[in-house]
Structure formats: structure tokens, C-alpha cells
Amino acid sequence: MRLTTFTDFGLRALILLADRNPQVMSAAAIADHFDVSRHHMAKVLQELAAAGYVEGIRGAQGGVRLARDPRDIRIGEVVRRLDDQPLVECFSPQGSNCALLPRCRLKGMLARAEQGFMRELDRYTLHDCLEKSASFPLADLSA
């Protein structure tokens, strides 16, 4: 599974805002922190605000801050909201030109894998990303 850059930036911004909660941060400060495009980060923050994860603060010291408790924000929920790219062409709502459909068995395998991926992300909250003492086992990536 691969997340879009948009989703990656969104998750990073939420983690930073949760870590600095209740501090207000500008889009520029968040973008500079991660050395990413300010324009792209502003778009990400607009989507996070539309979803109710962050709230905009107007004024000279304005910016954004977390709008919900980090314990109430599920990582899977954020990924579903931000990552609207289909895993493969045949998952697209517009349909597919794949010559293997409807007999392709790969589509079902990929759908189950994607569901498992999201179920795993649903187990964690934004707060879990902050826990310094939390120990999340990593899969052996050397195989």
C-alpha cells in the first residue's frame, strides 16, 4: 500500500499539531518544519479543516490548531478522508478498461489487502503517534 504525498503531509501536520497542542501554527511554519511546499501544505490544511481535524484561527497570530482530542482521531479515518486514489485502476468509481475483468481474481485479493491495511490503521489514534513509550512492533522488512 502506498499513501499519496497529500495524505503523508496531512498525517505529518496532524502529528505536529498534536505534539504542540494547543499551540496555533501557520501553514508556512508547518511546511517549513517538514521542508515541503507551503502552497501544498495550505491545501492539505484546508482539507483537514473541512474534515474537522483542525480549526483556523484568524488574526495576526493566526494559523491552525488541532480541533479534536488526538485520542479521538483515528489514523485510518484520516487516510480514508485524504487519500482518494484507487489502489488500482479497476477500483476506480469510473470503471476500468481492464481486459481481465470480470474473471480477474487479483482484484479481490487486492481489495482484501487494502481492507486489512485500513483495519490496521483504524487500531491507532493520533495520540498513539505521540506516545514516546509506546512500542509498535515493525514487520521484518529484510525479507
Image (spheres, grey):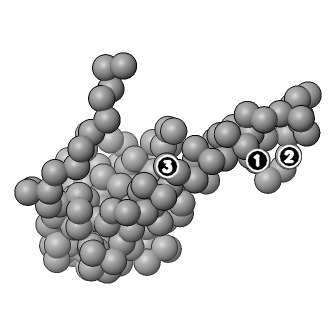
Residue that extends furthest to the left in the rendered view of this protein: 133
Please tell me whether mark 3 sits on a helix, a strand or a loop. Answer: helix
Q: Residue at x 30, y 29 (%)?
A: 140
In three-dimensional space, the C-alpha distance between marks 3 and 1, rounded to whole angstroms, equals 18 Å
Looking at marks 3 and 1 on the same chain, the residue that comes earlier in the sequence is marked by 1
In the drawing, what numbered circle is on residue 117? Answer: 3
Quadrant of residue 122 in the image? Answer: bottom left
Label 3–label 2 contact, CB within 8 A: no
Question: Which of 67 and 69 lies nearest the eye of the viewer?
Answer: 69
Q: Is residue 25 visible?
A: no
In three-dimensional space, the C-alpha distance between marks 3 and 2, rounded to whole angstroms, equals 23 Å
Q: Residue at x 23, y 62 (%)?
A: 128
Label 3–label 1 contact, CB within 8 A: no
The percent position of residue 76, horizontal first and vertical second, equals 45, 61
Up/down of 102 relative to 80, above or below: above
Looking at marks 3 and 2 on the same chain, the residue that comes earlier in the sequence is marked by 2
Q: Quadrant of the C terminus?
A: top left
Please tell me whether mark 1 sits on a helix, a strand or a loop. Answer: loop
The percent position of residue 74, horizontal first and vertical second, equals 39, 68
Please tell me whether mark 2 sits on a helix, a strand or a loop. Answer: loop
- Label 1: which residue? 92
In three-dimensional space, the C-alpha distance between marks 1 and 2, rounded to whole angstroms, equals 5 Å
Sort mark 1 into few (<14), some (14-19) or many (20+) by Cα contacts within 10 Å: few
Numbered-mark total = 3
Task: Give the residue type that dot 1 points to.
Answer: Ser
Up/down of 124 relative to 142, above or below: below
Up/down of 106 relative to 66, above or below: above
* Nearest-to-viewer mark from 3 and 2: 3
Label 1–label 2 contact, CB within 8 A: yes
Q: Is residue 132 left or right of residue 141?
A: left
- Label 2: which residue? 95
